[in-house]
């Protein structure tokens, strides 16, 4: 009887150790929750290309927005202005889901977003893989990524962004 209890105890202990070590390896999955690796994508605009994986090693702020969504447009403009003088610490990737290039270009001028920012348009809107990967049907948002491409925060305000950068 004691021999059986000892065997069961050893089996439970081994299972627990295995579970903890497995969970640690599985914790860095691709997704859109805090702690997840941000879904990778590549975009091209006016001969300029951005590949999210190539930006690892630097903090990245992904900002998804559209001209027809006032909240996301305002959030994009304010965070772009907040990081303007911090290009050595953080890279911004601003992605618009406007249907027309002319609308996008006019908004960039009006909101005074520098052409040196990584600003892109995904004209395929709601059917694009990027739109689906970041589940933007639930609303536009921004994501702050650490140097390893993991999501640190969502819907970051300029004040929060400054705190992360200091």
Image (tube, helix red, strand yellow):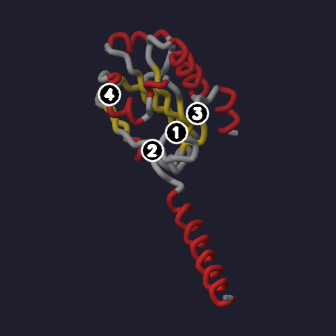
Q: Position of residue 72 (x, y in %)?
A: 52, 19
Q: Secondary structure at mark 1?
A: strand
In the depicted view, which residue is nearer to us: 17 or 9?
9
Quadrant the C terminus occupies = top right
Q: Secondary structure at mark 2?
A: helix
Q: Secondary structure at mark 4?
A: strand
Q: Earlier in the sequence, mark 2 or mark 4?
A: 4
Quadrant the N terminus occupies = bottom right
Distance of label 3 from label 2 (alpha carbons): 18 Å
User: Cβ–Cβ below 8 Å for labels 2 and 1?
Assistant: yes
Left-right relation of 56 to 154: left
Distance of label 2 from label 4 (alpha carbons): 17 Å
Which residue lies at the image location 37% right of the left edge and 10% below the top edge? 103
Distance of label 1 from label 3 (alpha carbons): 12 Å
Q: Is residue 108 above or below residue 51?
A: above
Read off the residue under disc 1. 60
Read off the residue under disc 3. 154
Q: Is residue 151 above or below residue 64?
A: below
Q: Earlier in the sequence, mark 3 or mark 2?
A: 2
Read off the residue under disc 4. 45
Q: Earlier in the sequence, mark 1 or mark 4?
A: 4
Which residue lies at the image location 65% right of the left edge and 79% below the top edge? 9
Q: Position of residue 118 (x, y in %)?
A: 43, 30
Q: Earlier in the sequence, mark 2 or mark 1?
A: 2
């Amino acid at each position: 009887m004691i021999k059986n209890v000892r065997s069961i105890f050893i089996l439970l202990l081994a299972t627990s150790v295995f579970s903890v070590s497995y969970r640690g390896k599985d914790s860095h999955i691709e997704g859109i929750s805090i702690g997840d690796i941000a879904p990778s994508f590549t975009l091209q605009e006016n001969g300029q290309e951005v590949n999210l994986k190539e930006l690892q090693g630097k903090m990245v702020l992904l900002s998804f927005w559209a001209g027809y969504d006032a909240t996301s447009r305002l959030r994009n403009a304010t965070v772009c202005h907040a990081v303007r003088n911090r290009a050595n610490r953080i890279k911004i990737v601003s992605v618009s889901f406007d249907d027309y290039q002319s609308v996008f270009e006019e908004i960039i001028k009006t909101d005074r977003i520098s052409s040196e920012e990584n600003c892109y348009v995904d004209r395929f809107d709601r059917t694009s893989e990027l739109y689906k990967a970041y589940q933007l049907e639930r609303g536009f948002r921004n994501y702050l990524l650490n140097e390893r491409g993991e999501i640190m925060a969502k819907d970051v305000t300029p004040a929060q962004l400054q705190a992360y950068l200091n």
